[in-house]
Image (tube, rainbow, N blue to C red):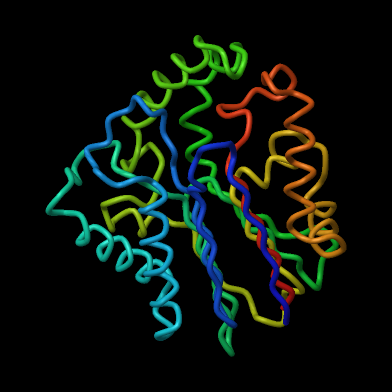
Amino acid sequence: MSLAFATEVGGLNRENEDFVGATPDAVVVLDGAGYPARLRTGCVHTVAWYTRMLGSSLLAMLTAGERPLAEVLAEGIKTVSSLHSSTCDLAHPGSPAATVLLLRRTTRSLDWLVLADSILVLDMNSTEEPMVVSDDRLADVTATLRTRLDALPNGSHEHEQERLASVEAQLEHRNRDGGYWVASTDPMAAEHSLTGSVPPDAVRAAALLSDGASRLVDCFELASWRCLLNILENDGPAELINQVRTAEHTDPHGARWPRGKAHDDATAVYWQL
Protein backbone atom coordinates (compact mmCIF):
# COMPACT_ATOMS: atom_id res chain seq x y z
CA MET A 1 0.00 0.00 0.00
CA SER A 2 1.23 3.50 -0.82
CA LEU A 3 -0.38 6.92 -0.75
CA ALA A 4 0.75 10.15 -2.40
CA PHE A 5 -0.89 13.55 -2.58
CA ALA A 6 -0.31 17.07 -3.81
CA THR A 7 -2.21 20.27 -3.14
CA GLU A 8 -1.71 23.75 -4.57
CA VAL A 9 -3.41 27.05 -3.85
CA GLY A 10 -5.26 28.68 -6.73
CA GLY A 11 -3.60 32.09 -6.62
CA LEU A 12 -1.17 34.46 -4.93
CA ASN A 13 -2.01 35.99 -1.55
CA ARG A 14 -4.75 33.44 -0.95
CA GLU A 15 -5.26 30.64 1.57
CA ASN A 16 -5.55 27.11 0.26
CA GLU A 17 -9.13 26.21 1.19
CA ASP A 18 -8.67 22.50 0.42
CA PHE A 19 -7.84 19.97 3.13
CA VAL A 20 -6.23 16.56 2.80
CA GLY A 21 -5.42 14.09 5.55
CA ALA A 22 -4.79 10.36 5.81
CA THR A 23 -4.17 7.44 8.13
CA PRO A 24 -3.02 3.97 7.01
CA ASP A 25 -6.68 3.05 6.41
CA ALA A 26 -8.55 6.27 5.61
CA VAL A 27 -8.36 9.43 3.52
CA VAL A 28 -10.22 12.74 3.88
CA VAL A 29 -10.33 15.40 1.14
CA LEU A 30 -12.34 18.61 1.55
CA ASP A 31 -12.73 21.46 -0.91
CA GLY A 32 -13.76 24.66 0.82
CA ALA A 33 -16.52 26.65 -0.86
CA GLY A 34 -14.68 29.91 -1.41
CA TYR A 35 -16.88 32.93 -2.05
CA PRO A 36 -16.26 36.39 -3.49
CA ALA A 37 -14.79 38.67 -0.81
CA ARG A 38 -17.82 40.97 -0.89
CA LEU A 39 -20.24 38.19 0.04
CA ARG A 40 -21.50 38.31 3.63
CA THR A 41 -21.22 34.99 5.46
CA GLY A 42 -22.38 35.63 9.02
CA CYS A 43 -19.13 34.02 10.22
CA VAL A 44 -15.92 35.53 11.58
CA HIS A 45 -13.91 32.52 10.41
CA THR A 46 -12.43 31.79 7.01
CA VAL A 47 -13.35 28.91 4.75
CA ALA A 48 -9.83 27.53 5.29
CA TRP A 49 -10.47 27.49 9.05
CA TYR A 50 -13.66 25.51 8.45
CA THR A 51 -12.04 22.88 6.24
CA ARG A 52 -9.16 22.40 8.69
CA MET A 53 -11.48 22.00 11.66
CA LEU A 54 -13.86 19.65 9.85
CA GLY A 55 -11.07 17.66 8.18
CA SER A 56 -9.18 17.05 11.40
CA SER A 57 -12.39 16.07 13.21
CA LEU A 58 -13.33 13.60 10.50
CA LEU A 59 -9.88 12.06 10.42
CA ALA A 60 -9.92 11.54 14.18
CA MET A 61 -13.32 9.85 14.07
CA LEU A 62 -12.33 7.59 11.19
CA THR A 63 -9.59 6.11 13.37
CA ALA A 64 -11.95 5.48 16.28
CA GLY A 65 -14.21 2.77 14.86
CA GLU A 66 -16.27 1.65 11.89
CA ARG A 67 -19.40 3.79 12.14
CA PRO A 68 -21.23 4.47 8.85
CA LEU A 69 -19.50 7.30 7.04
CA ALA A 70 -22.63 9.44 6.92
CA GLU A 71 -22.78 9.25 10.72
CA VAL A 72 -19.12 10.24 10.92
CA LEU A 73 -19.76 13.27 8.71
CA ALA A 74 -22.85 14.33 10.66
CA GLU A 75 -20.90 14.15 13.92
CA GLY A 76 -18.03 16.11 12.38
CA ILE A 77 -20.37 18.89 11.25
CA LYS A 78 -21.89 19.04 14.75
CA THR A 79 -18.45 19.25 16.31
CA VAL A 80 -17.32 22.16 14.14
CA SER A 81 -20.62 23.98 14.58
CA SER A 82 -20.13 23.84 18.34
CA LEU A 83 -16.76 25.57 17.93
CA HIS A 84 -18.29 28.78 16.55
CA SER A 85 -21.96 28.79 17.47
CA SER A 86 -21.34 31.48 20.10
CA THR A 87 -19.52 33.84 17.75
CA CYS A 88 -21.19 33.31 14.37
CA ASP A 89 -24.63 33.22 12.78
CA LEU A 90 -24.86 29.54 11.86
CA ALA A 91 -28.25 30.10 10.21
CA HIS A 92 -26.72 32.41 7.60
CA PRO A 93 -26.87 30.78 4.15
CA GLY A 94 -23.30 31.86 3.42
CA SER A 95 -21.70 30.09 6.40
CA PRO A 96 -18.39 28.43 5.47
CA ALA A 97 -18.89 25.12 3.70
CA ALA A 98 -16.98 22.34 1.99
CA THR A 99 -17.33 19.38 -0.32
CA VAL A 100 -16.41 16.05 1.27
CA LEU A 101 -14.62 12.89 0.11
CA LEU A 102 -14.13 10.05 2.59
CA LEU A 103 -12.54 6.69 1.81
CA ARG A 104 -12.00 4.04 4.47
CA ARG A 105 -10.60 0.53 4.23
CA THR A 106 -11.62 -2.19 6.70
CA THR A 107 -11.02 -5.93 6.65
CA ARG A 108 -14.46 -6.37 5.07
CA SER A 109 -14.94 -3.44 2.71
CA LEU A 110 -13.73 -0.25 1.12
CA ASP A 111 -16.30 2.38 2.10
CA TRP A 112 -16.75 5.74 0.40
CA LEU A 113 -18.71 8.95 0.82
CA VAL A 114 -19.03 11.81 -1.67
CA LEU A 115 -20.82 15.09 -0.97
CA ALA A 116 -20.91 17.92 -3.53
CA ASP A 117 -18.57 18.38 -6.47
CA SER A 118 -15.34 16.61 -5.60
CA ILE A 119 -14.63 13.36 -7.46
CA LEU A 120 -13.76 9.81 -6.40
CA VAL A 121 -12.23 7.52 -9.04
CA LEU A 122 -11.83 3.81 -8.24
CA ASP A 123 -9.50 1.75 -10.42
CA MET A 124 -11.29 -1.60 -10.39
CA ASN A 125 -9.46 -4.87 -10.85
CA SER A 126 -12.27 -6.39 -12.90
CA THR A 127 -12.89 -3.66 -15.50
CA GLU A 128 -10.77 -1.51 -17.79
CA GLU A 129 -12.83 1.61 -17.15
CA PRO A 130 -12.68 3.02 -13.62
CA MET A 131 -15.68 3.61 -11.40
CA VAL A 132 -16.30 7.35 -11.08
CA VAL A 133 -18.43 8.67 -8.23
CA SER A 134 -19.59 12.26 -8.64
CA ASP A 135 -22.35 14.28 -7.01
CA ASP A 136 -23.86 16.34 -9.85
CA ARG A 137 -26.54 18.19 -7.91
CA LEU A 138 -24.51 21.41 -7.62
CA ALA A 139 -23.80 21.35 -11.36
CA ASP A 140 -27.50 20.85 -12.05
CA VAL A 141 -28.35 23.91 -9.96
CA THR A 142 -25.65 26.16 -11.41
CA ALA A 143 -26.26 25.19 -15.05
CA THR A 144 -29.10 27.68 -15.36
CA LEU A 145 -27.20 30.36 -13.42
CA ARG A 146 -23.99 30.30 -15.45
CA THR A 147 -25.13 31.33 -18.91
CA ARG A 148 -24.16 35.00 -18.58
CA LEU A 149 -21.16 34.27 -16.31
CA ASP A 150 -19.62 31.92 -18.86
CA ALA A 151 -19.90 34.58 -21.56
CA LEU A 152 -17.76 37.06 -19.62
CA PRO A 153 -13.93 36.99 -19.53
CA ASN A 154 -12.28 35.81 -16.30
CA GLY A 155 -10.63 38.66 -14.44
CA SER A 156 -12.93 41.36 -15.76
CA HIS A 157 -15.01 43.57 -13.48
CA GLU A 158 -18.14 42.30 -15.20
CA HIS A 159 -17.17 38.67 -14.53
CA GLU A 160 -16.62 39.36 -10.83
CA GLN A 161 -19.95 41.17 -10.55
CA GLU A 162 -21.77 38.34 -12.27
CA ARG A 163 -19.95 35.71 -10.20
CA LEU A 164 -21.15 37.42 -7.01
CA ALA A 165 -24.73 37.46 -8.31
CA SER A 166 -24.45 33.81 -9.37
CA VAL A 167 -23.15 32.68 -5.98
CA GLU A 168 -25.89 34.59 -4.15
CA ALA A 169 -28.50 32.89 -6.33
CA GLN A 170 -26.82 29.52 -5.85
CA LEU A 171 -26.96 29.85 -2.05
CA GLU A 172 -30.74 29.93 -2.23
CA HIS A 173 -30.58 26.26 -3.27
CA ARG A 174 -27.97 25.14 -0.76
CA ASN A 175 -28.84 22.34 1.67
CA ARG A 176 -32.46 22.01 0.70
CA ASP A 177 -34.53 19.44 -1.17
CA GLY A 178 -34.41 19.98 -4.91
CA GLY A 179 -31.11 21.84 -4.58
CA TYR A 180 -27.68 20.62 -3.59
CA TRP A 181 -26.04 19.53 -0.35
CA VAL A 182 -22.69 20.47 1.15
CA ALA A 183 -21.06 20.23 4.58
CA SER A 184 -21.66 23.45 6.51
CA THR A 185 -23.59 23.90 9.76
CA ASP A 186 -26.48 21.43 9.36
CA PRO A 187 -25.59 17.79 10.12
CA MET A 188 -28.65 16.72 8.11
CA ALA A 189 -26.57 17.33 4.97
CA ALA A 190 -24.67 14.12 5.72
CA GLU A 191 -27.83 12.09 5.09
CA HIS A 192 -27.78 13.32 1.50
CA SER A 193 -24.23 12.11 0.79
CA LEU A 194 -23.55 9.51 -1.86
CA THR A 195 -22.21 6.43 -0.08
CA GLY A 196 -21.23 2.90 -1.00
CA SER A 197 -18.90 -0.02 -0.39
CA VAL A 198 -16.97 -2.52 -2.46
CA PRO A 199 -14.82 -5.48 -1.39
CA PRO A 200 -11.33 -4.24 -0.50
CA ASP A 201 -9.70 -6.60 -3.00
CA ALA A 202 -11.88 -5.29 -5.84
CA VAL A 203 -9.99 -2.01 -6.11
CA ARG A 204 -6.45 -1.59 -7.36
CA ALA A 205 -6.12 2.12 -6.59
CA ALA A 206 -8.22 5.18 -5.80
CA ALA A 207 -7.98 8.84 -6.74
CA LEU A 208 -9.62 11.55 -4.64
CA LEU A 209 -9.82 14.90 -6.42
CA SER A 210 -11.03 18.36 -5.59
CA ASP A 211 -12.69 19.97 -8.61
CA GLY A 212 -9.60 22.10 -9.14
CA ALA A 213 -7.66 18.90 -9.93
CA SER A 214 -10.39 17.03 -11.83
CA ARG A 215 -10.62 19.91 -14.36
CA LEU A 216 -8.26 18.12 -16.72
CA VAL A 217 -11.05 15.63 -17.42
CA ASP A 218 -14.45 17.07 -16.53
CA CYS A 219 -13.89 20.69 -17.57
CA PHE A 220 -11.05 20.76 -20.11
CA GLU A 221 -11.67 17.28 -21.58
CA LEU A 222 -7.94 16.89 -22.18
CA ALA A 223 -7.81 13.41 -20.67
CA SER A 224 -10.02 10.47 -19.79
CA TRP A 225 -10.39 9.15 -16.26
CA ARG A 226 -8.18 6.22 -17.28
CA CYS A 227 -5.53 8.66 -18.52
CA LEU A 228 -5.77 10.62 -15.28
CA LEU A 229 -5.15 7.45 -13.27
CA ASN A 230 -2.15 6.69 -15.45
CA ILE A 231 -0.73 10.17 -14.76
CA LEU A 232 -1.16 9.64 -11.04
CA GLU A 233 0.43 6.20 -11.11
CA ASN A 234 3.37 7.02 -13.38
CA ASP A 235 4.12 10.66 -12.56
CA GLY A 236 2.31 11.43 -9.32
CA PRO A 237 -0.33 13.92 -8.12
CA ALA A 238 1.94 16.95 -8.55
CA GLU A 239 2.21 16.26 -12.28
CA LEU A 240 -1.57 16.08 -12.59
CA ILE A 241 -1.87 19.52 -11.02
CA ASN A 242 0.94 20.78 -13.24
CA GLN A 243 -1.00 19.69 -16.33
CA VAL A 244 -4.11 21.43 -15.01
CA ARG A 245 -2.17 24.66 -14.47
CA THR A 246 -0.56 24.44 -17.92
CA ALA A 247 -4.00 24.19 -19.51
CA GLU A 248 -5.34 27.07 -17.41
CA HIS A 249 -2.49 29.35 -18.46
CA THR A 250 -3.33 28.77 -22.13
CA ASP A 251 -6.85 30.08 -21.47
CA PRO A 252 -6.55 32.78 -18.77
CA HIS A 253 -9.84 34.49 -19.60
CA GLY A 254 -11.97 31.36 -19.90
CA ALA A 255 -12.70 31.75 -23.60
CA ARG A 256 -12.10 28.07 -24.41
CA TRP A 257 -13.15 26.63 -21.05
CA PRO A 258 -15.61 28.92 -19.25
CA ARG A 259 -15.22 28.59 -15.47
CA GLY A 260 -15.94 30.54 -12.31
CA LYS A 261 -12.27 30.87 -11.37
CA ALA A 262 -9.34 31.01 -13.78
CA HIS A 263 -7.32 28.98 -11.23
CA ASP A 264 -8.79 27.01 -8.35
CA ASP A 265 -7.22 25.29 -5.36
CA ALA A 266 -6.28 21.82 -6.56
CA THR A 267 -5.81 18.66 -4.49
CA ALA A 268 -5.15 15.15 -5.76
CA VAL A 269 -4.65 11.96 -3.75
CA TYR A 270 -3.55 8.63 -5.23
CA TRP A 271 -3.94 5.59 -2.97
CA GLN A 272 -2.59 2.27 -4.26
CA LEU A 273 -4.34 -0.43 -2.25
Q: Quadrant of residue 178?
A: top left
Q: Is residue 196 visible?
A: no
Query: Which quadrant does the N terminus fall into?
Result: bottom right
Residue extending furthest bottom? 107
The x and y percentages for residue 166 are 43, 22
Q: Is residue 13 left or right of residue 218?
A: left
Q: Position of residue 193 (x, y in %)?
A: 44, 57
Q: Nearer the viewer, residue 35 or 73?
A: 35
Horizontally, residue 184 falls left or right of residue 2, namely left
Residue at image point 81% right, 46% down? 224
Seen from the viewer's position, the closer of residues 85 and 104 is 85
Quarter of the figure with residue 229 = bottom right
Residue at 35% in and 70% down: 71
**In front: 154, or 44?**
44
Indicate the position of residue 137 as horizontal and vertical percent values: 48, 40
In what quadrant of the picture does the C terminus appear? bottom right
What is the tally of numbered marks visible in this picture?
Answer: 0
Position above or below: 31 against 176: below
Point 27% across, 30% down: residue = 40
Q: x, y percentage for residue 93?
A: 26, 37
Up the image or down, 64 lies above or below 183; here it is: below
Q: 252 above or below 122?
A: above
Looking at the image, the residue that sits furthest to the front is: 13
Tell me if I can see residue 199 in this picture. yes
The image quadrant that residue 108 belongs to is: bottom right
